[in-house]
Amino acid sequence: MKSIIIIAAVALFAADPARSQALVDPNKVAPEYREAAEKRRAEQIRQRECATKADLEKVLPRDRTLYLNHCLEALAAKQ
């Protein structure tokens, strides 16, 4: 039984921590895909901005998706 616990603990510590998706860098993309990369980067920035607002307003996890969708729609309406 001890060996199973030790193996599980080693597996947990050996696993890489989960990281958020990195922002797309349009300069590192082939020229034919640069426009799409710029659009994706703009979308990622809007998503992060809304997530930061949700964190600051301490939105509950159960309400977070609704809040983020509403925030993204509001940002799209402004543009």
Image: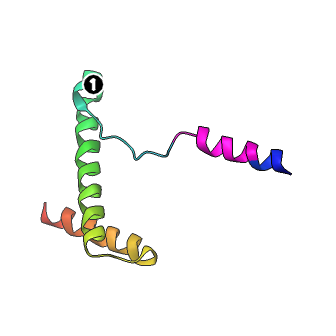
Residue at horizontal 22%, vertical 26%? 27
In the rendered view, tell whether residue 10 sits above or below residue 54: above
* Image label count: 1
Residue at horizontal 21%, vertical 62%? 76
Amino acid, disc 1: Lys
Q: Residue 31, image x and y in percent?
A: 24, 22
Q: Tag 1's secondary structure?
A: helix
Q: Quadrant of residue 77?
A: bottom left
What residue did someone put label 1 on? 28
In the rendered view, tell whether residue 53 sits above or below residue 23: below
Residue 12 as seen in the image, left or right of residue 18:
right
In the rendered view, tell whether residue 60 sits above or below residue 42: below
Residue at horizontal 32%, vertical 75%? 58
Colour approach in the figure: rainbow
Q: Residue furthest top?
A: 30
Q: Is residue 12 magenta?
A: yes
Q: Residue 66, image x and y in percent?
A: 38, 74
Q: Residue 5, image x and y in percent?
A: 76, 50
Q: Residue furthest left?
A: 78
Residue at horizontal 50%, vertical 44%? 17
Q: Residue 47, image x and y in percent?
A: 29, 57
Q: Quadrant of the C terminus?
A: bottom left
- Seen from the viewer's position, the closer of residues 45 and 18 is 18
Q: Residue furthest front?
A: 2
Q: Quadrant of residue 60?
A: bottom left
Near mark 1 (Cα within 10 A), the count class, few <14, some 14-19 or many ≥20, is few
Q: Is residue 52 magenta?
A: no
Q: Quadrant of residue 78?
A: bottom left
Q: Which residues are magenta?
A: 6-16
Give the main secondary structure of the magenta stretch.
helix
- Seen from the viewer's position, the closer of residues 31 and 18 is 18
